[in-house]
Image: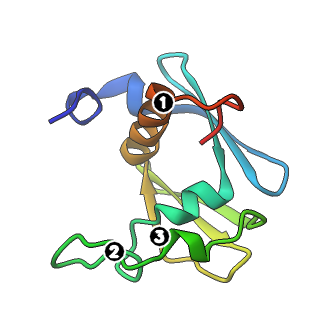
Amino acid sequence: MNETTRRRGPAIEPHEIMQEGAAGLRIKWGDGRVCHYEAAALRRVCPCAQCVNEMTGRRMLDPSSISDDLTVDTLDIVGRYALTFRWSDGHQTGIYSFRLLRELCEQHEEGTSESGRL
């Protein structure tokens, strides 16, 4: 179990969620950390049953099939625990828990690119 999985409270509670343009997302977490996400990168890790086999956990979605030009059509909050997106490719079934989003950010920052965006 990694640190994010064990962590509760402010570290996985968003303080502010902002869409940045058509293809970006910024989350400021309760502990002050700010994470930036790109639409295509999030779509490539979609956790829904269409993209990940529920029985085996095997990823069914080929990440190379997602265009770098993908955008967010709509963004909605699911309860107090997740976000859901309608992507420009029509996909809309993924529920991205705040825990998953925070974990993706932390994993990305361990191998940060020049842009600092996921």
- Say above or below: 117 vs 46: above
Q: Nearer the viewer, mark 3 or mark 1?
A: 1
| Mark 2 neighbour class, 10 Å CA radius: few under 14, some 14 to 19, many 20 or more | some
At mark 2, the secondary structure is loop
Residue kind at label 1, given as amino acid type? Gly
User: Which residue is label 1 attached to?
Assistant: 111
Q: Position of residue 77 (x, y in %)?
A: 55, 56
Q: Which residue matches tag 3?
A: 94
The Cα atoms of the two marked residues, 1 and 2, are separated by 24 Å
Q: Name which residue lies at 61% across and 66% down.
A: 85
Q: Is residue 74 left or right of residue 56?
A: right
* Residue in view at x 45 percent, y 57 percent: 96
Q: Residue sitting at 34 percent across and 72 percent down?
A: 59
* Residue 52 image label: 2
| Badge 3 amino acid | Gly
Mark pair 3, 2: CA separation: 10 Å
Mark closer to the chain start, 1 or 2: 2
Using the image, determine if residue 43 lies above or below residue 93: above
Residue 42 position within the rendered picture, expressed as x and y whole percent measured from the top left:
56, 57
Farthest top residue? 32
Could you say whether the residue bearing mark 1 is in a helix, strand or loop? loop
The x, y position of residue 45, in whole percent, is 46, 61
Mark found first going from the N terminus, 3 or 2:
2
Q: Position of residue 22 (x, y in %)?
A: 82, 57
Point out the tag, 3 or 1, that comes first from the N-terminus: 3
